[in-house]
Image: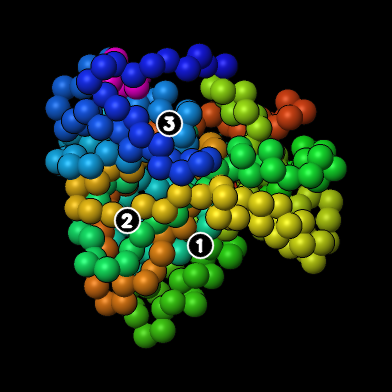
Amino acid sequence: MTQTLEPPANITVTRLAGNIGALVSGVDTGTAVTDDAVQAVRQALLDHKVVFLRDQHLDYASQVAFAQRLGDLTRGHPTISSPDDKPFLEEIDSAKGTRANQWHTDVTFVQRPPAFTLLHGIIIPPVGGDTIWANTVTAYASMPGQLRDLADRLRIVHSNATDYAAVFDRDSGTDSSVAAHRAEFLSTIFETEHPAVRVHPETGERSLLLGGFARSVVGFSPQASRDLIRIMQEYVTTPEQTVRWQWRVDDLAIWDNRATQHYAIFDYGSQRRRGERVTVSGPVPVGVDGRESVALRGDASQYYVGG
């Protein structure tokens, strides 16, 4: 477990909501950041699950350099190609059909989902395009004791071929870019069995490991699986567990992917929305009973090759 440390005097951390979210001021991630500043950001992440930094003037190299201070990096995505010479980058670009308007934790369909995600706002629509994050630690704590006991024992299969991918079908219409993105997203099918409740490797907190990639509960029928996932998921997305961020150009959002879900709101019509995402490699999740997640389908070894 980590010990909460006070940030340096020149750095302020301001809470944004009761259970999740903080604004970090006094850190310029595009320059040579001190070890104390990196530690302050990391501590704020552990304390508040998602943090926001305004006016971060980043290019690919500087975003990668800062992200590497938090840990080794993954490739941009297990199935979606990165731009040439930018292997750690995933483009979150509405012009290329990228949308994430489904509650999810990043890349849970592989055995080692990212630990941290860093998203830099490049093009922001004049209205709309906010993102909502939810705290999956306080969501777990808010469940009745009997439901927590059950969740502690459940194992859930996650896949990229599930409800999250169905968002592309729902929103595509005649949009060829959305259809192309969906095809690339599903070009390799992954399945992983995770604990429904994971133990955070740094804080020791228990958090729900669910979201849009969660497909079925091991040992239960399809209908019972859907019901169980829905019941637990409702505790994640109650407003009390959330914070909503209204983006500006050059905002940097960083979240602890081991303790959050998020939803990018698609309410900006034909306006363009673009962010650039880099992810920090995470460990294999471990359940309350000490059992690790198990990869069932798909080889994600190249995704984990970072640094």
Residue 250 visible in image: yes
Q: Quadrant of the C terminus?
A: top left
Q: Nearer the viewer, mark 1 or mark 2?
A: 2
SS assignment for the magenta stretch, majority: helix
Q: Which residues are magenta?
A: 36-40
Q: Residue 45, labelled with which disc? A: 3
Q: Where's residue 11, x and y in %?
A: 26, 24
Q: CA distance from mark 1 to mark 2?
A: 17 Å
> Colour scheme in the image?
rainbow
Q: CA distance from mark 1 to mark 3?
A: 22 Å
**Which residue lies under the disc numbered 1?**
102
**Which residue lies under the disc numbered 2?**
246
Q: Is residue 250 above or below residue 34?
A: below
What residue is at 53 percent from the left and 29 percent from the top?
283
What residue is at 14 percent from the left and 27 percent from the top?
31
Please state which amino acid type lies under the numbered disc 2. Answer: Gln
Q: Where's residue 245, x and y in %?
A: 36, 52
In depth, the one of 288 and 301 nearer the eye is 288
